């Protein structure tokens, strides 16, 4: 480890870092703008200047930009040198010549990197007496607000948007002090990762437009560490509330998972919490005055529970605790997964393989660091967006690493690396049914039918290991396979990515076999935030519950947990299911088609109002914490309700409250596959120096005044018995353990950039390790996981189409669709066919066709999907108004809709 | 006195390839192709030819950093920087419009020396006449087999293209030029890596000034010693010097390296016009420090001008007379530099417009005493190393020396609340 001298004191630093990284790692406050740990150095802003000296005798030294200078053993530098300090202050004065003095009305105020850096440099007096330049702002869509006058031209936005996220509709225009960052004309930013601009921008040029609707300063937010519940990746987020309303979602850094960024569905999909469609009061139907008190509810439930058989429908979007509590209430044999048979079967398979330990899941960080990625079948751009962003980084970083090796350029030197790299890319093979935006950066991309994707997977595996079965007599397939296999042969950290949305088991077995053959890690994208947690319970599917109900019927009371069954299986089946059950008890947070069927409706907390644990696609159990106590209604976490009901049923209630930890301990003993889950965060009694961790930053301004319009006496703050947090600003002021970080703040660092103070080093792990506990252990069996059944090549069927779902990154989320802004960006439901099929049907693009399967049918407008193989129909899935189909089965399409039937 | 660079200059009717060949043209290409690339590099290095674009770096040395041999990355590139936009500078124009084949010959030899595969002439957009001539000359060279595949049976191939810029001063900076050539914004790149290692499209690249290339054929034809012998000073060769301002005969002349400022102004430019005296001299273009009448006997070579506190730059001087307001003069320059800043780094983007506005307000009689401190601060903080490239430091050279030599003028503006000129 090199030693460098900072203001004459020696420090050990890591090799290969630049001086700015070294100084920040050591805890020094050194201002910067254009540098970003995820974007590295370009030397544009000149803010991070320090003095560097030739040797001990050199007293003059020279100014260098610390982000552009690598550490060298014995190097001497000064942060406190007067010239360096004066220069850094001068940079701020220059930036301020045109920056508006509008902090009081700026959304960034109070969490602004420019404010922090201004204070840090000491600049306080304006000498520039001339007029400021002004710009016209642009309409960038419903997610981001644009205020160009505040721009300090750090170039981070375009570097993030274009280089990191691969967008092409944001750019820098004009020159000298007229430089402009925006689109070529007003319009919606196209990247589904655009929201990160609000955090990447060091000032208020790009700000969260949904926050603007109900604006609150950072210092007035009540915040808690949370986990995104809009896909299976499990990005860590911070959710912020004020006055009973969820105001915003911010990224919560987790070095292993999402790093610095989240996708737009994750950032903006929170508005359902504030929806008017919320269930706030227990409802007992078929009586006068449906709204019930908690006592009435319990009384009514008491009768049901003691006299009737129970059947429970779990949910992939409910926490592990809630699903387990339901399982306890209804009994193991009466608990069902609550997803279609196809989905339940495949997710259980994946969970089962993972449990053997024979194949290992790749975290997002491991995907980013992989040198060869092969995607088999899954459109991760739309089903696990941050996984797609990680794949993009793999492609970029592999080329950068190669360049660094060839040229001795340091990896942090982004500009130089990019010039050298030009169009070179790491190896990505993106094999999907209908293409994806990742194709642009893929060395090898192809659209194939699911069975053919599986066959290609087998063919690659055979190239790597001749003892595995091969796919004979398909020349073109073999050629493709060889090209991909060659890349895998030399790969050091390959990753195979797949998922279940092709509804094809062969793709998964091919992916697993391929991963085994090349010692790759796997990333299997799953449908929901807790699909893995639910699958680990190894319960039967929803169809099985329907079957049972048809068989045994009538005597059952069904308890449905946070699940709109109509989104999982066909309406006919669900209707039939409810028609057979004696009573339907539904626990959910929002009214939907399923809650309509409930005789008893119990209001559950959303992620923001409750505690829980989710298991992401890789088997990482992550805890999310309650942000706030709902101001009105009787809302509790589902697990709390269910546990009350369980105790009621067992007549074991002793008046004590029960806590998530107890529930998880019980889970560990009942279902050993969940062993370790209690360790995903410190227990509820955890304190530091006897203090709890405050959910509010210490500048919180409103605590004593919040209710002053109604009541001048300050009520006792709500106590939190479930977690180590307080609902106030009082408590421990230092760094909490990584799973318990409610917000990033450090003295002098009010913006999100404060995260550096919580990390081992910029871009590294959080101090004490990144949160989350892997439930999958080291291999328990040594036999490699390989399969041998290769499907026949896909054959088009006469007048039938293989039905597959087509998801949309912003439109397909059940909960996120309650955000108006996302709804606006969601496509309309449609059915996509190949151009040839469309011609065969004799219909025009845009006209409606009738889709028939298993006795159900629907009408949808048809569009051409480039690349889609013949004989496959992609049906928009998950959108509001999208039909629910038996995916992976064959349906009929009737194009002659103009007839006189 | 030998004038190798300008002997064949004809601004009415430049030599065609055939006419040039009749006068010995392209013999340097033939000769060089019989040498090894390393021999050509060595010869140029020994000639002590220094870059004529302004920085004065040894040309052969610059080439020597290009990776050579079988494992060298390809394609390698060679670029002629013909984006002549330094205010007051017009020497390359003379060479481009008067004798384009000399440039092309020099480029071919240089390209051979570094084993380049593709070459570009990056030409200032406003040089329309030069563009037409270069286009025609390149076509002639292709036809004669000096460009294209397997040149003169040597097995070595070179393509050459003309690229006209869109008129950004920034493109005179070689890395910004490369970005522009790649179709990107004309912002400079960080060095290292130098273009010799990672240049155009990330490949080894040499960028030289037009005049530098024009010297090459003569060095190859006549030898390094001959080239050194042309000079009156340490720096080898002849130089195209220029003089503009209120002199009797403004113009450009090829002279031995190291003539004095006095000789240039008094003999070649015919002295000052009647009624005007020399007040200051920018010896090498707008981005060099002022010299004064005290420096008339300074030799115009890289070392001597530096010793006098300025830079030789392009060697084309601007003479400021005693009837011209130094504040207005410098304001005019800063207006140019502020406008030509690419907008990449903070000090240049924000500092230069501030300087420009302060100077304008002083010129208009609205200046304050503290403005001089602000100007001084900019002169210091926009210095080399503090900004991303040399544009702002260059801009500060005339300002800082004006503050030194003409401070009285600035103060008079402020105290009299107006321009005394």
Image (cartoon, rainbow, N blue to C red):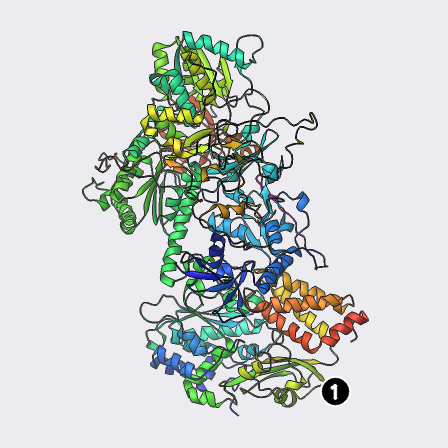
What is the x, y in percent for residue B56?
51, 78
Q: Is residue B363 magenta?
A: no
* Residue placed most toward the observer, A574 or B137: A574
How many other residues sit within 10 Å of disc 1, few (<14), some (14-19) or many (≥20)?
A: few
Q: Residue at x 73, y 77 (%)?
A: B324
Helix, strand or loop under label 1: loop
* Residue placed most toward the observer, A510 or A531: A531
Q: Residue at x 39, y 76 (%)?
A: B113
Which residue is under mark 1?
Answer: B274
Task: Give the side of residue A118 with respect to residue B179, left or right.
Answer: right
What is the x, y in percent for residue A310?
39, 13
Main secondary structure found in the magenta portion: loop
* Residue placed most toward the observer, A65 or A107: A65
Q: Which residues are magenta?
A: A126-145
The quarter in which the N terminus of chain A is drawn is bottom left
Residue A100 visible, this angle: yes
Residue A310, compared with residue A726, is above or below; it is above
Quarter residue A338 falls in = top left
Q: Is residue A128 magenta?
A: yes
Residue A842, compared with residue A362, is above or below; it is above
């Amino acid at each position: 480890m090199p030693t460098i001298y900072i203001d004459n004191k020696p420090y050990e630093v890591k090799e290969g870092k630049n001086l700015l990284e070294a100084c920040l790692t050591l805890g020094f406050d050194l201002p910067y703008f254009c540098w970003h740990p995820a974007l590295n150095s370009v030397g544009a802003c000149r803010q991070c200047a320090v003095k560097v000296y030739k040797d001990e005798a050199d007293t003059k030294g020279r100014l260098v930009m610390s982000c552009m200078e690598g550490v060298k053993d014995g190097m001497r530098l000064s942060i406190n040198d007067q010239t360096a300090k004066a220069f850094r202050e001068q940079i701020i004065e220059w930036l301020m010549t045109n920056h508006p003095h509008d902090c009081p009305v700026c959304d960034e105020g109070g969490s602004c990197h420019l404010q922090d850096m201004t204070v840090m440099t000491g600049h306080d007096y304006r000498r520039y007496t001339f007029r400021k330049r002004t710009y016209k702002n642009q309409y960038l869509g419903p997610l981001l607000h644009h205020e160009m006058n505040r721009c300090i031209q750090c170039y981070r936005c375009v570097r993030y948007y274009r280089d990191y996220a691969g967008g092409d509709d944001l750019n820098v225009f004009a020159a000298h002090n007229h430089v402009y960052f925006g689109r070529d004309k007003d319009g919606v930013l196209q990247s589904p990762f655009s929201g990160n601009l609000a955090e990447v921008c060091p000032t208020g040029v790009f700000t969260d437009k949904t926050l603007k609707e109900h604006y609150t300063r950072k210092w007035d937010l009540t915040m808690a560490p949370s986990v995104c519940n809009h896909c299976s990746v499990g990005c860590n987020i911070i959710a912020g509330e004020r006055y009973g309303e969820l105001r915003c979602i911010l990224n919560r850094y987790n070095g292993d998972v999402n790093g610095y960024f989240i996708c737009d569905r994750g950032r903006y999909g929170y508005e359902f919490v504030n929806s008017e469609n919320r269930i706030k009061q227990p409802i007992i139907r078929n009586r006068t005055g449906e709204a019930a008190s908690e006592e009435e509810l319990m009384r009514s439930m008491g009768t049901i529970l003691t006299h009737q058989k129970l059947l429970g429908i779990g949910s992939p979007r409910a926490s592990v605790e809630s699903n387990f509590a339901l399982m306890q209430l209804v009994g193991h044999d009466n608990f069902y997964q609550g997803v279609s048979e196809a989905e339940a079967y495949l997710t259980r398979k994946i969970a089962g393989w993972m449990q053997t330990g024979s194949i290992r899941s790749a975290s997002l960080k491991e995907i980013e660091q992989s040198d060869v990625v092969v995607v088999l079948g899954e459109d991760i751009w739309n089903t696990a967006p941050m996984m797609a962003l990680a794949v993009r980084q793999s492609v970029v970083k592999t080329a950068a690493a190669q360049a660094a090796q060839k040229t001795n350029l340091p990896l942090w030197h982004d500009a130089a690396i990019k010039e050298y790299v030009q169009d070179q890319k790491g190896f990505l093979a993106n094999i999907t049914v209908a293409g994806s935006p990742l194709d642009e950066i893929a060395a090898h991309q192809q659209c194939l039918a699911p069975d053919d994707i599986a066959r290609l997977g087998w063919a690659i595996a055979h190239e790597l290991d001749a003892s595995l079965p091969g796919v004979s007599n398909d020349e073109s397939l073999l050629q493709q396979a060889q090209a991909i296999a060659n890349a895998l042969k030399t790969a050091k950290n390959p990753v195979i990515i797949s998922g279940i949305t092709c509804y094809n088991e062969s793709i998964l077995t091919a992916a697993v076999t391929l991963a085994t053959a090349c010692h790759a890690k796997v990333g299997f994208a799953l449908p929901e935030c807790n699909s893995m947690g639910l699958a680990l319970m190894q319960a039967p599917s929803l169809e099985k519950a329907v079957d049972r109900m048809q068989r045994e019927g009538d005597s059952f009371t069904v308890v449905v947990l946070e699940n709109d069954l109509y989104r999982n299986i066909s309406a006919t089946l669900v209707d039939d299911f409810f028609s057979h059950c004696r009573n339907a008890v539904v626990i959910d947070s929002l009214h939907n088609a399923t809650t309509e069927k409930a005789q008893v409706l119990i209001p559950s907390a959303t992620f923001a109002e409750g505690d829980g644990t989710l298991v992401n696609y890789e088997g990482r159990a992550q805890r999310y914490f309650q942000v706030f106590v709902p101001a009105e209604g009787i809302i509790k976490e589902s697990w709390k309700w269910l546990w009350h009901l369980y105790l009621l049923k067992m007549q074991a209630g002793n008046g004590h409250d029960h806590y998530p930890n107890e529930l998880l301990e019980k889970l560990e003993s009942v279902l050993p596959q969940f062993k370790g889950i209690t360790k995903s965060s410190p227990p509820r009694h955890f304190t530091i120096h006897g203090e709890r961790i405050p959910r509010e930053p210490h500048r919180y301004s409103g605590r004593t005044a919040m209710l002053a319009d109604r009541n001048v006496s300050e009520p006792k703050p709500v106590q939190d018995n479930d977690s180590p947090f307080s609902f106030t600003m009082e408590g421990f002021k230092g760094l909490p353990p990584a799973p318990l970080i409610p917000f990033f703040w450090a003295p002098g660092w009010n913006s999100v950039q404060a995260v550096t103070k919580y990390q081992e080093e910029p871009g590294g792990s959080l101090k004490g390790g990144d949160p989350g506990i892997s439930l999958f252990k080291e291999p328990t069996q040594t036999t490699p996981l390989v399969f041998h059944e290769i499907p026949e090549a896909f054959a088009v069927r006469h007048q039938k189409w293989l039905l597959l779902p087509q998801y949309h990154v912003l439109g397909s989320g059940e909960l996120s669709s309650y955000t108006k802004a996302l709804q606006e960006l969601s496509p309309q439901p449609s059915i996509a066919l190949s151009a040839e099929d469309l011609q065969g049907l004799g219909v025009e693009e845009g006209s409606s066709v009738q889709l028939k399967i298993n006795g159900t049918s629907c009408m949808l407008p048809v569009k051409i999907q480039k690349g889609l193989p013949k004989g496959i129909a992609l049906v928009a899935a998950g959108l509001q108004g999208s039909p629910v189909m038996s995916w992976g089965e064959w349906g009929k399409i009737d194009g002659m809709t103009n007839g006189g039937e | 006195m030998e004038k190798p660079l300008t002997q064949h200059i004809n601004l009415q009717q430049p030599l065609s390839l055939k006419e040039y060949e009749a006068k010995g043209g392209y013999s340097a290409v033939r000769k060089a192709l019989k040498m090894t690339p390393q021999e050509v590099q060595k010869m140029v290095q020994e000639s002590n030819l220094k870059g004529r674009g302004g920085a004065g770096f040894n040309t052969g040395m610059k080439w020597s950093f290009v990776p050579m041999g079988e494992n060298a990355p390809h394609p390698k590139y060679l670029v002629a920087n013909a984006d002549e936009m330094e205010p007051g500078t017009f020497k390359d124009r003379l060479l481009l419009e008067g004798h384009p084949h000399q440039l092309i010959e020099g480029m071919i030899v240089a390209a051979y020396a570094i084993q380049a595969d593709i070459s570009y002439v990056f030409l200032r957009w406003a040089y329309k006449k030069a563009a037409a001539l270069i286009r025609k000359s390149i076509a002639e060279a292709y036809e004669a087999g000096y460009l294209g595949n397997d040149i003169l049976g040597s097995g070595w191939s070179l393509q050459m293209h003309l690229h006209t810029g869109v008129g950004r001063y920034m493109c005179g900076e070689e890395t910004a030029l490369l970005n522009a050539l790649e179709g990107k914004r004309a912002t400079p790149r960080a060095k290292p890596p130098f273009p010799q290692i990672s240049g155009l499209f990330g490949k080894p690249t040499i960028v030289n000034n037009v005049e530098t290339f024009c010297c090459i054929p003569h060095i190859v034809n006549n030898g390094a010693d001959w080239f050194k012998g042309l000079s009156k000073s340490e720096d080898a060769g002849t130089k195209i010097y220029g003089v503009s301002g209120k002199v009797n005969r403004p113009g450009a002349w090829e002279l031995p390296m190291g003539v004095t400022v006095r000789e240039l102004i008094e003999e070649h430019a015919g002295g000052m016009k009647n009624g005007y005296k020399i007040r200051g001299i920018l010896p090498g273009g707008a981005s060099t420090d002022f010299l004064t009448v005290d420096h008339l006997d300074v030799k115009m070579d890289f070392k001597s001008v530096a010793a006098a506190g300025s830079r030789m730059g392009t060697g084309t001087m601007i003479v400021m007379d005693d009837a011209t307001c130094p504040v207005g003069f410098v304001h005019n320059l800063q207006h140019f530099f502020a406008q030509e800043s690419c907008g990449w780094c903070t000090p240049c983007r924000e500092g230069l417009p501030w300087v420009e506005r302060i100077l304008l307000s002083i010129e208009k009689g609205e200046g304050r005493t503290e403005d001089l401190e602000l100007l001084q601060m900019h002169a210091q903080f926009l210095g080399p190393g503090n900004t991303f490239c040399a544009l702002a430091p260059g801009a500060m050279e005339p300002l800082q020396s004006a503050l030194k030599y003409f401070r009285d003028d600035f103060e008079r503006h402020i105290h009299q609340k107006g321009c005394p000129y």
